[in-house]
Amino acid sequence: MTCSAALLFALILASCASTESSTELKAFVLLDADKFQYINKSQAVVPRSPCSTYKVPHAIFGLEAGYLKGKDFVQKYDSTRDHKKSFWPDAWVKDHTLESAVKNSVVWYFREVARQIGPKRMQTYLSKIEYGNEDISGGIDRFWLSSSLEISPKQQVKVLARLLGDDSPLKKENVTTIKEIILWDKSQKHPVHAKTGTCRQSNGNYGAWLVGFVDVEGSPKYFASYLEGSDYKNLSVKRIEFTLNSLKKFGVL
């Protein structure tokens, strides 16, 4: 092999390795009745920051506390309190309802919800649903974003089943509200209710979540997908493909 050919071959290998390493790990958990099924079980039990998947219980907590008054409850954007960051999408920089804030993962909206709930009530709610490590020491308006609160994919599905199931310890009307808001995909064989979440993890990589449930003729199948790597955009796309393929693999879709 000539030097130039060897160099070209090395570059191709490096390119392939770089593409492959952009998604460094994947994990999937499905809870069907009392049965857990896994893809990459060893990673499915590792705790990580929940990122914006925390908005599912967070929204219900805000409703339980009486601060949020339903899915149409509006909070006005205050640029003096929540300064626009360079990475913010334009959709964040305006007033939002609870429904639009969940669908657009509007961080400032839920930071204010957290301040209104306060540490004492927030801790009580987290303990009631046994959410991950229940650690809010990272700050009342940021503990779920690359901070102290951590949860594993397996714990995610257990919490969803506890939180959204018929025996939820929280008010049925508040649970119904969030279930309606997170209806994510009606084009599949069965409706998929889900919430995304992406943020930096403690190792510096991005963690990309997709958690929720599939409503199979009134029998919910709870799931959690987690991908981790260095390429934010790649992960955001790949988690959808990975989740749908995993649900089909296990016969849910």
Image (tube, rainbow, N blue to C red):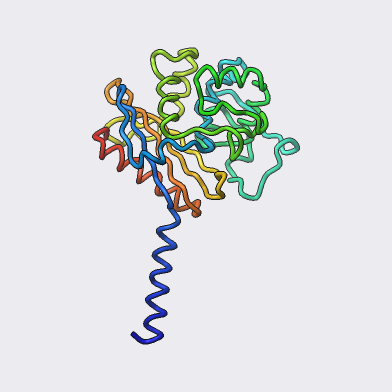
- In the displayed structure image, the side of residue 249 where residue 146 appears, left or right: right
How many marks are shown on the rendered structure? 0
Residue in the picture at 43% in, 41% down: 226
Quarter of the image for the N terminus: give it: bottom left
What percent of the width, then of the height, locates residue 185? 36, 35
- In the displayed structure image, the side of residue 247 where residue 21 appears, left or right: right
Question: Can you tell which quarter of the image residue 127 is in?
Answer: top right
Residue in the picture at 49% in, 44% down: 207
What percent of the width, then of the height, locates residue 63? 56, 18
Question: Can you tell which quarter of the image residue 113 is in?
Answer: top right
- In the displayed structure image, the side of residue 243 where residue 148 appears, left or right: right
Is 194 in front, or is 207? 207
Residue in the picture at 40% in, 78% down: 8
Residue in the picture at 71% in, 41% down: 83
Q: Residue furthest front?
A: 42
Is 53 in front, or is 177? 53
Q: Residue furthest bottom?
A: 2
Quarter of the image for the C terminus: give it: top left
Q: Residue furthest left?
A: 251
What percent of the width, then of the height, locates residue 163? 45, 20
Question: Can you tell which quarter of the image residue 32 is in?
Answer: top left
What percent of the width, then of the height, locates residue 126? 55, 22
Q: Is residue 234 above or below residue 172?
A: below
